[in-house]
Structure formats: C-alpha cells, structure tokens
Image (cartoon, rainbow, N blue to C red):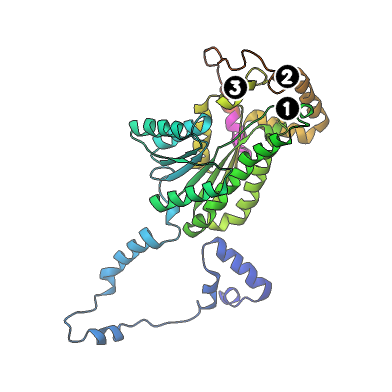
C-alpha cells in the first residue's frame, strides 16, 4: 500500500514532499525508505579483539542515546514544555508603557526578558525592578530604526544567551494629526513607518535564520484596533500597523513548516505616555498598561493568529457590511474631536504641564459582559 507514496513521480511527488515537510520529515527519506540495511558490529568487534573491551548490548546504551538526542539534537526540542517558564523573550520599546508592563509580566511568569529601547537609564531601572522581585532581565540599548544597531544587539544576545524564543514587537511611535495639517509634513509619515513597520521587520529578519535553525519561534506584534476601525486623524500611524499586520500574515504562511508563528494584537487605546498629547481628544477610554500586558502574555502563551476587541471587531464588520455608513460615522468623529494645539502648530504655555492625577477609570473591556466575550471566542478566528 505504501508503494504509490514511496515511488511517486511528478506532481504526486511534489504533493508527497509538501506533506512530509509540514510533518518535519526530510522529503529525501522517501527515496531510500524501501532499502533493507543490515547493521552488524563485526568490524567493531574485530578492532577491539585482544583489548579487553567488549561491545555492550544495544539495550544497555540505547536509552541514554535517546535521551541525549531528545535533549540536545532533536530539532523540535525548543517547542516543548511551558510556554514561558525558562523562555528567552525580546521586548522592544521596553522602557515605558506597554513594553515595560509586558516585561514585568513576562518575567513574573518565569521567562528571561531581553529589554530593548533607546533609553538606557529607563531600561536599567526596569531590570533593577524585575530582579528585585526575583525575575531575570537584561537591558540592551538598541535603536530599531538602525540596521547596524539591531544586528549588533541580536548577535550580542545570541552570543551571550544562546537563543531567543519569542519576540514582542512593541516599539512604536504615534502621531495624531489630520491630513489637512500634514500636507507639509511628509517626514511624519516616514519617521512613523521607520519605527512601527521597518523597525519590527528588522527584528524579525535578524532572528529568522536563528529560528529556522531551531525550528521554533513566535512573534507578537502590538498592532492597533484602529487598523480595524480606520480612525480619523491617524493617517500616519494606522497604515504602519496595517502594513505590519500584512507582513506577519504573509511571513506566517511561509514559515509554518518551520514552526515560526505570529500573533497580531489589535490593541485598544492604552494609557501610556504616547497618548498624553491627545488624551482628551479620543472618543474611547484607555485601558491600563497592565491589561495590555495581559493581552501580550496571552499572545505568547496561546499564540492565536490575532487578538481583537469587541469594539474593533464591530468596527471591522461595519466597514465590510456598511462602508458608507461607517465612513459617515467616522467623519462625525473627525469633526467632533479636533486636532490638538500641537498638531495645529499652536504653542500653548501649559503644553508641557503634566496632567493632574486622577482616579483610574474602569477599562472599556471591563464593561463587556463575560458571556459575550466567551461567545466571541466560539467564532473561528475571533479572539477577544
């Protein structure tokens, strides 16, 4: 019955080899699997004659060989055990906001964190805090917009710590400005793309050969729910996240047999320093950094293709089902929430004044009934 598979030719052979590759079986093995080799120890025994050394019985050393292979040589050994305990995780943009909260959360789960950012002092404070609570973390000053910096950092990490299991592409820049106030600011679009898209791509490309060799790797991209909603005033920011989503989806389809996977988190608005300039001009409430970090943890542990929010899913559905209505609604948001003074080029005396402390507000997600969230998870491809 196996003959048609073993002796396949033409298109059938191509299909056979495709199936074998996805199972981790070298396709070439089918060309020799029909051979019937005989293994003997005659040559070894002859070489050892008169030395007092005897060839041991196979059963006495086979288990040891198997354990050594499984622990040190099995190409799939990196995909076993706990999702985070003992894992090595790179987090970009770890000096503040979502990245900092994610680094702390990942370290609490027993992983070793490699924290990357440009602010070395902030990274040192983060590492000190993680270690004070018994976690493992190391700081690496790195600019993801600089290819040489990324290459040097990745080589340094691999040289000192042997391997990397996960990458969290969190480093980002956001600009909230209407396009009519951006006609002379093409550099805004270029610098946001340099960080949010090309920075993340640099990190993936730098780690990809290492992951293919280990046959394991996972990337969590901190994207935005705005990619689904198409919020106005973010024409320089949202396209960078949409491009990163598409990059991850394409690469994931190419690296599936290498066990390299991707998760795109369509993150809602998060209370971070990045949104301070426009904190009063957003129509939705921001969730806490800790809740955002929990979404990152879920992406690392469960590894879904994407993690959405109910509001983001609703907005995306609206864009497909009723695009004209969705556009009119978004236009009302555009008219109702004007550009900030800085976005309009107006300087204000109190622009640099820090916001007054206030009681944290309940997150938007907390208002979503748990049964509704569970119902959403029953729909294939929807992860709330």
Q: Above or below — where is 130 with respect to 282?
A: below
| Residue 375 falls inside the magenta stretch | yes
Against 35, is 76 above or below? above
Dot 2: what SS? loop
**Foreground pick, 39 / 92:** 92
- C-alpha gap between disc 3 and disc 1: 15 Å
Mark 3 or mark 2, which is nearer the start of the sequence? 3
Which residue is located at x 34 percent, y 64 percent? 66
Q: Is residue 354 magenta?
A: no
Could you tell me residue 143's position as x and y percent? 54, 41
* 61 relative to 306 in the view: left or right: left
The mark found on residue 276 in the picture is 3
Residue nearest the observer in this picture, 55 or 57:
55
From which residue to which does the magenta span run? 373-384
Instruction: Please give left or right for residue 250 compared with residue 296 in the image.
Output: right
Q: Earlier in the sequence, mark 1 or mark 2?
A: 1
Q: Looking at the rendered structure, which numbered label has been put on residue 337? A: 2
**Snapshot quadrant of residue 369:** top right
Residue at which label 1 appears:
233
- Label 3: few (<14), some or many (≥20) within 10 Å? few
- Whether residues under marks 1 and 2 lie with C-beta atoms below 8 angstroms apart, the answer is yes
Where residue 292 appears, as percent x and y from the top left, is 53, 30
Q: Point out the frontmost of discs 2 and 3.
A: 3
Q: Residues within 10 Å of mark 2 (few under 14, many from 20)?
A: some
């Amino acid at each position: 019955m196996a003959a048609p598979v073993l002796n396949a030719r033409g298109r059938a052979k191509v299909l056979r080899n495709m199936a074998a590759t996805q199972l981790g079986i070298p396709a070439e093995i089918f060309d020799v699997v029909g051979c019937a080799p005989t293994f003997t120890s005659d040559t070894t025994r002859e070489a050892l004659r008169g030395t007092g050394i005897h060839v041991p019985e196979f059963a006495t050393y086979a288990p040891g060989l198997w354990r050594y292979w499984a622990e040190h040589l099995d190409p799939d050994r990196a995909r076993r055990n706990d999702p985070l305990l003992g894992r090595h995780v790179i987090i970009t943009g770890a000096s503040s906001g979502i990245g900092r909260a994610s680094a702390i959360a990942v370290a609490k789960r027993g992983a070793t964190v490699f924290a990357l950012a440009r602010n070395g002092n902030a990274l040192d404070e983060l590492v000190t805090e993680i270690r004070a609570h018994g976690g493992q973390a190391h700081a690496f000053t790195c600019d993801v917009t600089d290819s040489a910096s990324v290459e040097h950092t990745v080589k340094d990490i691999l040289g000192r710590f042997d391997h990397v299991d996960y990458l969290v592409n969190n480093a980002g820049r956001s600009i909230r400005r209407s396009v009519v106030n951006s006609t002379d600011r093409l550099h805004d679009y270029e610098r946001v793309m340099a960080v949010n898209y090309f920075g993340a791509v640099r990190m993936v490309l730098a780690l990809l050969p290492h992951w293919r060799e280990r046959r394991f790797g996972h990337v969590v991209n901190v994207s935005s729910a705005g990619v689904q909603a198409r919020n106005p005033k973010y024409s320089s920011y949202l396209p960078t996240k949409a491009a990163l989503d598409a990059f991850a989806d394409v690469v994931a389809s190419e690296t599936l047999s290498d066990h390299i996977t991707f998760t795109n988190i369509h993150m809602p608005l998060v209370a971070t320093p990045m949104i301070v300039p426009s904190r009063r001009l957003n129509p939705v409430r921001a969730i806490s950094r800790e809740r955002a970090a929990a979404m990152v943890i879920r992406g690392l542990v469960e590894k879904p293709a994407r993690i959405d929010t109910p509001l983001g899913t609703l907005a995306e559905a609206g864009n497909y089902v009723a695009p004209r209505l969705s556009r009119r609604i978004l236009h009302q948001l555009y008219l109702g929430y004007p550009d900030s003074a800085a976005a309009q080029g107006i300087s204000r005396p109190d622009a640099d004044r820090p916001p007054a402390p206030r009681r944290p507000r309940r997150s938007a997600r907390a208002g979503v009934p748990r049964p509704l969230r569970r119902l959403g998870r029953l729909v294939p491809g929807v992860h709330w």
